[in-house]
Amino acid sequence: KHCGGAVPSVNKSTMEAIKVLVPEPPEQQKIAHCLSSLDDVIGLESHKLDALKNLKKGLMQQLFPQEVA
């Protein structure tokens, strides 16, 4: 809702009129558990990616060895 003026503003009555749905605690726990599991998966995949980058680096060094001057 636009309250007028050059820059839109929000006042207390506008904020109080906004309905916010909040899940019950058991559902919040399920959501938190799901997000935590996703964080774990992302962490594991990140470690795999780092390992693959290191492997690639090693293979590239074997493919194109640098001569010692």
Image: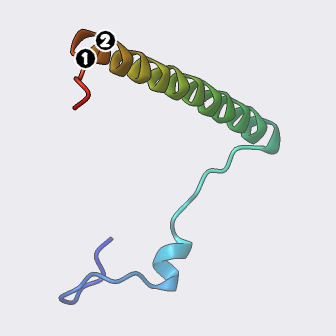
How many residues crowd around disc 2 within 10 Å: few (fewer than 14), some, or many (20 or more)?
few
- Residue at the image point whose x is 33% and y is 12% from the top: 59
18 sits left or right of 41 in the view: left
SS class, disc 1: loop
Residue 32 at x, y percent in the picture: 70, 38
Colouring rule applied to residues: rainbow
Q: Which amino acid does label 2 sit on?
A: Gln
- Point out the image quarter for the N terminus: bottom left
Q: Which residue lies furthest to the front in this view?
A: 69
Is the residue 45 above or below the residue 28 in the image? above
Which residue carries the number 2 mark? 62
- Residue plotted at (51% across, 74% down): 15
Kind of residue at disc 1: Pro
Q: Residue at x 28, y 16 (%)?
A: 60
Residue 45 vertical position relative to residue 17 in the rendered view, above or below: above
Near-viewer residue (46 or 29): 46
**Pointer 1: what residue?**
65
